[in-house]
């Protein structure tokens, strides 16, 4: 089962600045990209309308944005100096 999961949902190594938040967001980002790829394939293959694909991707994008916000990624630190 694990081999099939690795094939269907491969994960790449994270090379960025390590923090638990960055690692979790990277996993979320990879999952987002994989799901968008599936949706695009379904739409290209005629199994989903462009409108359905758009709405599905829009929902996934909102989830990713919420994840980023909840993890505190990209916040400007309270650093008064330039």
Image (cartoon, rainbow, N blue to C red):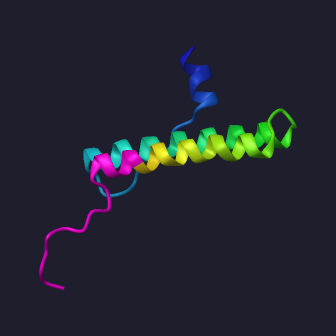
Highlighted magenta segment, given as a residue range: 66-82
Q: Is residue 45 left or right of residue 53?
A: right
Quadrant into which the C terminus falls: bottom left
Residue at the (37%, 51%) spot, across then down:
68
Of all residues shown, which one is farthest toward the right? 46
Quick check: 21 above or below 78? Answer: above
In terms of depth relative to the viewer, which is nearer, 52 or 15?
52
Give x and y (percent) for residue 25: 38, 46
State whether residue 13 appears in this view: no
> Where is residue 42, by image quadrant?
top right
> Where is residue 56, by image quadrant?
top right
The secondary structure that dominates the magenta segment is loop
Residue at the (24%, 68%) spot, across then down:
76
Give x and y (percent) for residue 81: 13, 83
> Where is residue 43, by image quadrant?
top right
Quick check: 6 above or below 22? Answer: above
Residue at the (58%, 32%) spot, across then down:
9
State whether residue 40 appears in this view: yes
Q: Is residue 49 left or right of residue 33?
A: right
Q: Is residue 67 magenta?
A: yes
Quadrant into which the N terminus falls: top right
């Amino acid at each position: 089962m694990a081999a099939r999961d690795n094939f269907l949902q491969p994960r790449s190594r994270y090379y960025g600045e390590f923090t638990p938040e960055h690692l979790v967001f990277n996993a979320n980002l990879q999952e987002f990209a994989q799901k968008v790829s599936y949706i695009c394939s379904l739409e290209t293959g005629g199994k989903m309308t462009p409108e359905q694909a758009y709405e599905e991707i829009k929902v996934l994008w909102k989830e990713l944005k919420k994840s980023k916000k909840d993890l505190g990624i990209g916040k400007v630190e309270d650093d008064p100096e330039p």
